[in-house]
Image (spheres, rainbow, N blue to C red):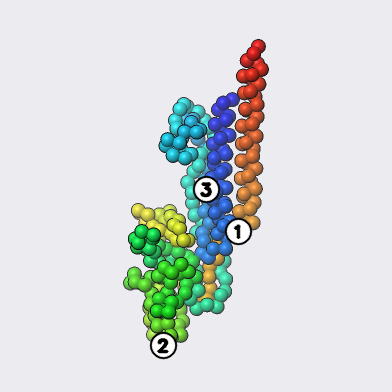
Amino acid sequence: MVKGLYTAYSGMVNQEHRMDVLTNNLANVNTNGYKKEGATSQSFDAVLAYKIKDASEGYNLAKRIGINQPGVKIGEGYTDFDQGAIKTTGNTFDLALTDSGFFAVEFTDKSGNTSVKYTRDGDFTLTQDGELVTRDGDPVLNTNGQAVKINPNLDTQINVSGQLIQNGRVADTIQVTDFADYNYLEHYGENYFQPIEGAEETDPKAQVYSGYLETSNVSAVTEMVNMISVQRAYESNQKIITTIDSTLDIAANQLGKL
């Protein structure tokens, strides 16, 4: 009977994690180029029971206290890289990528450390100095790894190869990068991705389209349906704990007196 408490508890923790992921997806339903995240669950094989309130090894980590089969544990997270819908903006420096690939951006953190991040969000603007930047002011990189910079006083056309054309010549070329295996990419703040150890760059298939933006690939309806399912599963586990608690109360306080 006590094992049922561990099973229900692990189920609640798992559903809570899934709800966090779904909530984050819904919060980014209108974020350009956002790729939705998902969560998986794994059944316990022959593992040790949770010491529920023990935080010595970190939040929601198992403290092994005995052999048990406590239901389910949080599996790996994943990112759905399917392309979002393309919308028309008519702005020259709004750029959308078709197929696989990412824009390269120079990102500077709060400590002043600079690194290259990757994004599908092509909501760019041209500064008065002629530098192409993201909505947050991070420079967009060219094929040489430098900030894209052009004459801000000249008309500009951007072709599908990412070349910025001014006065009939190529003024600069936007860098588009792709990776052989997206499992080696992880989400980073500001709607960016960053490669981890093992990431391998490859030739991109993407084409650049000026005057368009890629929207989020999150379906609000689907996420809401999933949230209802998660909530019901969570409530079911709550009822299991309540039922077992009532049974234990009867066993300890009523039958125990006999």
Whether 185 is drawn above or below 242: the answer is below
Q: Quadrant of residue 158?
A: bottom left
Residue corresponding to mark 2? 167
Is residue 240 visible from the viewing direction of this image?
A: yes
Q: Position of residue 226 (x, y in %)?
A: 62, 50
Q: CA distance from mark 2 to mark 3?
A: 50 Å
The local crowd at label 2, few if under 14, some if 14 to 19, many if 20 or more residues have their Cα within 10 Å, is few
Q: Earlier in the sequence, mark 2 or mark 3?
A: 3
Q: CA distance from mark 1 to mark 2?
A: 42 Å
Residue 164 in the figure: left or right of residue 144: right
Amino acid type for the residue under numbered disc 2: Asn
The local crowd at label 1, few if under 14, some if 14 to 19, many if 20 or more residues have their Cα within 10 Å, is few
55 or 88, which lies in front? Answer: 55
Residue in the picture at 47% in, 27% down: 67
Residue 219's disc number: 1
53 or 76, which lies in front? Answer: 53
The local crowd at label 3, few if under 14, some if 14 to 19, many if 20 or more residues have their Cα within 10 Å, is some
Mark 3 element type: strand
Amino acid type for the residue under numbered disc 3: Ala
72 or 109, which lies in front? Answer: 109
Q: Earlier in the sequence, mark 1 or mark 2?
A: 2
Residue corresponding to mark 3? 39
Residue in the picture at 63% in, 44% down: 231
Mark 1 element type: loop
Q: Position of residue 209 (x, y in %)?
A: 49, 74
Q: Position of residue 21 (x, y in %)?
A: 54, 50
Whether 173 is drawn above or below 244: the answer is below
Image marks 1 and 2: residues in contact by CB distance under 8 Å: no
